[in-house]
Image (spheres, rainbow, N blue to C red):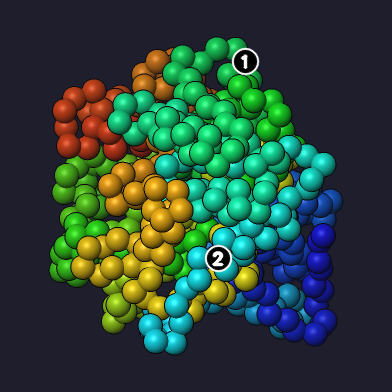
Amino acid sequence: MINQYLPHQASLVLESDLAGEFPLYLYWPSSQSMLLYSASITELLSDVRVSKPLKVSVHGLSFLLQSGVVPPPKTAYQDIYIVGIGDEAQVGTKNDKVQVTFSHQFPFMNANRLASDEMQPDEVVILQMLAEATQSRIDESKPSYLFHSAGKDSNSIALALAEAGWQHTVTLLTHKSKGKADESEISAKIAKQLGFKHQILYEVDQLQIEHHQAIEDYFIHAPFPCTDNVTLAYPLYVQQLPELRGANIIDGGGNDSYMATPPTRREAHNVLLSKVMHRASFLRQFTPSESSFLPLIRTSAECFGINGLSFMDAEKVLPDAINVYPHWKQESHLRKDWDLFDFKTDVYSTRTIAEVHIRKARNFSDSISSNFVLPFANQHVAEYFSKVPEEYLFDRKALHNKIILRRMLKNRLALDSDKLGKMGFSYDSHSMILQNWVGILNELQACPLWEQTYLMKMIMRLKKTMQTHHKYAEFSGRLIYRMYLLSAWYNKNRYLNA
């Protein structure tokens, strides 16, 4: 459904739901003649009132290059905005034109939680809420798949659905990663234990014709660019399981905003360092992206999953690029007196998680016309957990999070998350780059966004680093991969090439 606001209509305030299950997408043209908004990005971008082809925002592209994410409300497109977790858009009329003023207020501050003697979380209630949140969004005429791992989130949903008797309705899918990161055997064991059907999806290193076609289809139809390292694994899943098209796709993301994301000890140290070192930010315009010095001159906000090209490289490869430092400096200043757990959770969950990790899954679902189901982001689930006392969610000393989920899975599934450690889907983009090097180069060279002479110089420099034992060898490979993802999006996307 598309909503419209015209000049002189009654003013309104636009917000997404509490945990961003349904972000709002806005089209506010530079003429300021109207405002269109919808919870569906594909419906909005397909509307005839949205001028196409869309134009790339240099502001947005600068953030994708240097930070890996465009901080909402702005996006990679001119005139397209996102209202997500904690965001607000005040809409009114001024001088016969539509005016929109954006603001952000994080809704899950830990100081607002109930005390431990006021509330004790109930596992039965939690499982019932998760089951209802999933079932209420499922189209029962379509097959349903839960992306499953050894992690706390997807297993909580699997357990909830099992106890609700949905074993024969949902299939668990797991990605088989390389080496120690592989979770497929654990996933298969849990599926068998709970009575679900189970299927393993495999990585593809050497791309064949059918794989290239699947990737091209993805870039044509995905609404937004995304820099997540696992991005290319998703379109290749459809080659292995065509039934994913149009299906219900259930994802375990969406709870980091209200369960808190504890800073690691290294991040806490880097935040202290950044309070002094960020003053040397002018060196960003002289430092190569793979330099070990670059992380030392980040702002505090950039210590939480935000990284990319140095401004030196970004400005030379995209001549009109802006320096993102002032934005992250301001974000850091606004939170300078915050508890570090609130600081990280706000920046990390509403930017990196929402617009990189979850956006990856949203893009995939939109690209194959699937129904994306995000149970943990459900309004009722978020409201419940927003009140849960801190001690049931995270440990400030051990830096563990989601304690109530850990206990529930250990008691009911004999799944010891503490013993397993942090796990999640991983993707070997390093191997993909090297085994498909000619195709990667062709895509980069076909992209008119970049200054090609410097681009090739930078890419070959990064490739040389990624093939060494340099501290940032893996990071250098991911920067090449990022440049490829952005180039393929620009070259192929239907909204840019209408």
Q: Type of residue at label 1?
A: Glu
Q: Position of residue 379 (x, y in %)?
A: 63, 69
Which disc, if any, is residue 210? 1
Q: Label 2 to label 1, Cα distance in Å? A: 46 Å
Answer above or below: position of 260 versus 170: below
Front residue of this view, candidates 231 and 466: 231
Residue 334 x/y as whole percent? 36, 78
Q: What kind of element bears circle 2?
A: helix
Q: Quadrant of the C terminus?
A: top right
Q: Position of residue 8 (x, y in %)?
A: 82, 82
Q: Amino acid at mark 2?
A: Val
Disc 1, SS: helix
Out of 7 and 462, give the one closest to the viewer. Answer: 462
Q: Are marks 2 and 1 in contact (CB under 8 Å)?
A: no
Residue identifier under label 2: 124
- Compared across the picture, whether 326 is left or right of 291 comes to right
301 or 80, which is in the foreground? 301
**Place of residue 238 in the rendered image (x, y in percent of width and height, measured from the top left):** 63, 27
Query: Badge 2 local density, few (<14 within 10 Å), some, or many (20+)?
Result: few
Sequence-first tag of 2 and 1:
2
Number of residues whose C-alpha sits closer than 10 Å to that of mark 1, classed few (under 14), some (14–19) or many (20 or more): few
Left or right: 132 in relation to 279: right
Q: Nearer the viewer, residue 419 or 470?
A: 419
